[in-house]
Amino acid sequence: MIFMPLWQRLLVVAAIVGALVLAAPNLFYDRVERANDARAQIAAGITSPELEAEAALWPAWLPSGLVNLGLDLRGGAHLLAEVQVEDVYESRMDALWPEVRDALAAERETVGFVTREQIVPTELSVRISEPSGVPRAVEIVRGLARPVPTLTGGGAPDIEVTADGTLLTVRLSEAERAATDDRTVRQALEIIRRRIDEVGTREPTIVRQGADRILVQVPGVGSAQEVKDLIGTTAQLTFHPVIQRTTDPAADPGPGGMLVPALDEPGVFYALDRTPVVTGEQLVDAQPSFDQNGRPAVNFRFNPQGARAFGEYTAQNIGEPFAIVLDNEVISAPVIQSAIPGGSGIITGNFTVESSTDLAVLLRAGALPAGLTFLEERTVGPELGQDSIEAGRTAALIGLAVVVAYIIASYGLFGVMASAALAINITLLVAALSVIGATLTLPGLAGIVLTIGMAVDANVLVFERIREELRRGAGPARAIDLGYQKAMSAIVDANITTLITAGVLFFLGAGPVRGFAVTLGLGIVTSVFTALFVTRLMVSVWFNSRRPKTVVV
C-alpha cells in the first residue's frame, strides 16, 4: 500500500482547490477588469449608478486578481524620452545668483557694484566695477561652494569660479554635473511614475535606460499622445514679483528680470523678477475646486518653509501684483489684497473642470526637474495585442498536445495522470501570477510554453525510477514508493539550477526579460510540486483503490 500522510493529501487538495478559485477570474477577464476599475473609482470617492452597475459585474466576495496583460498583449503606448539635464544647470545658476549678489554686496567697498550679465544660460556671469577687487571677489564666491556628496563623504566643490577681467564666471564642476544629472533623471523617473499612477493606468513599465533616457510603456491607453500629454508637461509652478505689465514683446525686463507671456491674454507680457518667492517644489497639496464665482480653479497648500516665505512676501507687498507662472506662462497675476499667512491659496484662470483636474494632478505629482525630448514613440493597437494572445495561445495548445500525446504513449495510465497534473500545473501557475499581480508579456508567454515542456521532466524521472525498481524485482507498491523517494533528489537538483538562472535573469534583467524570468521561476516551482505531490496523490488513490498485482509503466 502506497503511504502518503493525511496532512500531505489535504495540503495538495487545498492547493488545487485554491488555485482553481484564484485562477477562475481570468476566464471572465473583461467582466472582472471592469468591476475592479469601477471599485477603484468608488474607493477614490467617485460614484454614480453606472459605476455601481459596473462594480456589480463580479461578486465582491470572490477573488478578483487578474494576470495583467502587458503592452504587447493588450496594446498601448511605448515612449522613449531623453531628459534635458542641461535645464537644471540654468535653474541652479538662477538660484545661486541672489546668494552671490548678497555676498559680494557685503564687501562693496572692495569689489564695487555687482551686476549680472546673461551670456551662457548654464553659467552665472557676474561683473564687478572694481578691477582691483577681482581676487577678493573670486575668493568670496568660491567660499560659497559646497562639497559634492560621495560614498566616502565630501568630495570636490560643486562650483568652479574663473575671472576674465572684471567678469566672474560661475559654473557647476564636473563632479557636480555628474551628480546633478543622476539626481535629475532619478527625480524625473519618479515623477513620471507618480503622474501615470495618478490616472490609474495598469501595470506601466517605467525604467531608466542609459545615462539620461527613460522608457515608458503603458498598456491599455489609446495612443502615445495621451501619455505624452500627461508626462510631457513640466508643470513648473513658480510665484514671482511683477515689475511691470506690457504689450511690447521686446520690452527690457532689466537686470535680474525676465519677460513672460500671459496665458489667457494674447499680446500681453509681464516683466518679472527672475528669482521666485516660492516654487512648486514647496507645494504639499493641490486639489481642483471652484472660485467664488463658481469657475473651475485649483486650491494649493505650501509646506512650512513655503508658507512662511509666501506669508512674509504677501504681508510686505499688499496692493502689488503677484504673478503665478506655470511653464513660463503667467496664468494669473492677482493683486495682493492682504497677507496670506496660512500657506494656502487658489489659482484661477481660464480653466475647465478637466483642465483644473489635470493641473492639480501634475502639481501633486511634482514638477519635472527638466524638459523631456521624446526620441521614440509608437502605439501598439489592441488588434495586434489580440493577435499576439492568439498566437501565444495556439503555441501553448500545440505544445500541450504534443507533450500529452508523448507522455501517454510512453507511460500509459501513468502518462494520463501526468497529463492531468500538467493541467493542474498550468492552473497553479496562472493562480500565482494572479495573486502577485504579475504582468504577462510575450516573453512571459514563452516562459509558460517552456514550463509545459519542462513540467513532464520530473514525472519522467519518477516513472523511469519506478521502471528500474520493477526490473529489479520489487513489488508494485514498493517500486512506486522507491521511485518517488529516489527521484526526489535528482528532481530538486535539476530544477535548482534553472531556478537560479531565472533569479539571475530577474534581478539583472529589465522589462520583458524579467517577465520571462517570473513565469519560468514560478513554473519550476509549480512543476516540482505537481510532480512530487499531485501525481503521487493520483497514483496513491488509484493504487489503493484498485490494488493491482502488476504495474505497467
Image: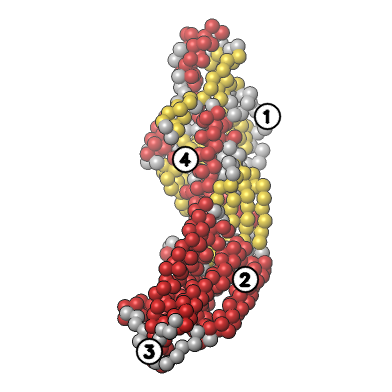
Mark 1 Cα within 10 Å, few/some/many (few <14, many 20+)?
few
The structure residue drawn at horizontal position 62% and vertical position 71%, both measured from the top left corner, is 392
- 156 vs 204: above or below: above
The residue sitting at the front extreme is 472
In the image, 495 versus 114, the foreground residue is 495
Sequence-wise first label, 4 or 2: 4
Closest to the camera, between mark 1 and mark 3, is 3
Is residue 364 visible in the rendered image? The answer is yes
Q: Secondary structure at mark 4?
A: helix
Give the amino acid at mark 1.
Ala
In the rendering, which numbered label is found on residue 544? 3
In the rendered image, residue 383, in percent from the top left (x then y), is placed at 67, 68
Closest to the camera, between mark 4 and mark 1, is 4
Residue placed under numbered mark 4 in the picture:
281
> Dividing the image into 4 quarters, which one contains the N terminus?
bottom left
In the rendered image, residue 440, in percent from the top left (x then y), is placed at 55, 65
In the rendering, which numbered label is found on residue 250? 1
Q: Secondary structure at mark 2?
A: helix
Give the amino acid at mark 3.
Asn
Residue placed under numbered mark 2 in the picture:
392
